[in-house]
Amino acid sequence: METPEIAGMRTIHEIGSHAAAGFPVSVNPLRRSQPLQSLPITPRGYPYPYHAKEMHMPQPRILFVIGSLRKGSFNQRLADVAAKHLDGRAEISTLDYRDLPQFDQGEEFPAPPSIADAREQVSQADAVWIFTPEYNYSYPGTLKNLLDWLSRPLDPTFQDKTTVLTGKKVALTSAAGKSAGAGVRGKLTEILDFLKSDLLGRQVGIVLPGEAFVTGEYEPSADDVKAVELQADELLDSIGK
């Protein structure tokens, strides 16, 4: 026996049939004048609820930190790959820390304006992604100086030893020589573990082609791009967990 339709109303069966056929489904079936909107469909053919709310959720903020200050550096190229892959899914910004003073405990409180600004950017980010070269099987001095500043407690009495890196989600990527940045990634892992950061399990190490060190140019291979994109997806999925 067929279920009679109320004038102006579409039955659940009709909605499911339209969804299964790939047609848009009306948000409010009682109003024919309302434009139809395409909504994600559940496996059973019904629109997902609360989709409108999810559409207005703010994008996660990811702060890039590039270990090399050279314009167009190899690691900047990897950061560009990540930014392109995350476009439309995350708010990306890059920390400019080239003008930070050398760490001086006598200048901690009040912190110099450039230090306060760097700390604020890290604090506001949902995750920090470090792309860094390897210098002498270790980290660049400028990057270590930044981490020294970020590692200091914000409380001048030191009663609260929380820093802006405490619990912060951090991802590590390195384009380097034959070591694929194993040295710098290992030492950064030690530091960030000590600071109680939340390190992403997937790290990416890229072996740069020899000619890159001669020409100063590097075009990431398809494999390099895929590795960074997988790391980007994992980082995005881990935010908020």
Image (cartoon, rainbow, N blue to C red):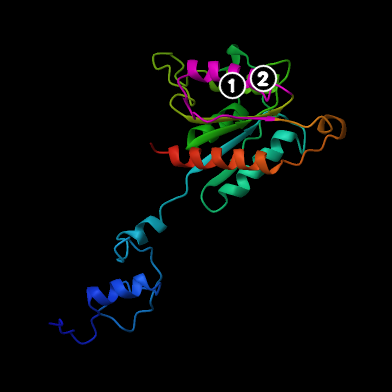
Q: What crowding class fits label 2: few (fewer than 14 Cα within 10 Å), some (14-19), or many (20 or more)?
A: many
Magenta-tinted stretch: 178-206
Marks 1 & 2, CB-CB < 8 Å contact: yes
Look at the numbered disc 1 and give the secondary structure of its residue.
helix
Going by the numbered disc 1, the residue's amino acid type is: Leu
* Residue at the image point whose x is 73% and y is 23% from the top: 178
Q: Is residue 28 visible?
A: no
Say which element carries label 2.
loop
Q: Which quadrant of the structure image shows residue 131?
A: top right
User: What percent of the width, then of the height, locates residue 38?
Assistant: 41, 70
Query: Relative to 105, does residue 55 appear above or below in the rendering?
Result: below
Amino acid type indicated by mark 2: Tyr
Which residue lies at the image location 52% right of the left edge and 18% below the top edge? Answer: 152
Residue 52 percent coordinates (x, y): 36, 61
> Residue 158: where, in percent of width, then height?
43, 13
Residue 139's tag is 2
Left or right: where 180 falls relative to 105? right
Q: Which residue does the numbered mark 1 point to in the structure image?
A: 147
Q: Which comes before the other along the chain, label 1 or label 2?
A: 2
